[in-house]
Structure formats: C-alpha cells, structure tokens
Image: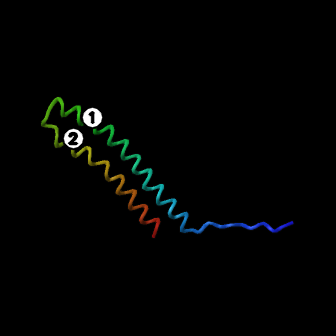
Amino acid sequence: MAAEEFVMMDPAGYKAIGAGIAVGLAGIATGIAEKDIGSAAVGAMAENEALFGKGLILTVIPETIVIFGLVVALIVGA
C-alpha cells in the first residue's frame, strides 16, 4: 500500500478566507439594510421634503457595519 500524503493548507489561506467572509457578509448585510432604509426615506421625503437630512443620516448609518467588517478583516489578517 502506498503511503497517503496529507496536504495541509497554509494558515495564511485560512486567514484570507476568514477576512473575505467578514467583509463579504458585512457588505451583504449593509446592502440589505440600506435597501430598506433608503426606500423608507424616499417615501418619507415624497410626503415631506424637510425630512431629507434625517433620511440621509439614517441611510449612511449602516455603512458602519462595513467598516466594522473591514476592521475585523484587518485584525484577522495581522
């Protein structure tokens, strides 16, 4: 019988996969959140134009989720 060879993946590869998953899932979650908030903000602004500032701020808030995902990816990659 021939000896079996075990091929180990480089730990840097696992880090890269983890960082990619962190940023990717954070980006998907942000897209879903901005879709819902954006449609509600546009509906509110259609009725009252004075709500533009509040709608803009609420639309930008989910972007912090991607920033957190990027920070996690940088920490995992270090």
Image check: 67 left or right of 7? left
Q: Residue at x 43, y 62 (%)?
A: 73
Q: Residue furthest bottom?
A: 78
Q: Quadrant of residue 67?
A: bottom left
Q: Residue at x 50, y 59 (%)?
A: 18
Spatial distance from mark 2 to mark 1, Cα to Cα?
A: 8 Å
The residue under label 1 is 40
Q: Residue furthest left?
A: 50
Residue 17 placement (x, y as % from top left): 52, 59
Q: Residue furthest top?
A: 47
The residue under label 2 is 55
Q: Residue at x 22, y 46 (%)?
A: 57
Residue 41 placement (x, y as % from top left): 24, 37
Q: Is residue 56 above or below residue 78?
A: above
SS type, badge 1 = helix
Quadrant of the frame with the C terminus: bottom left
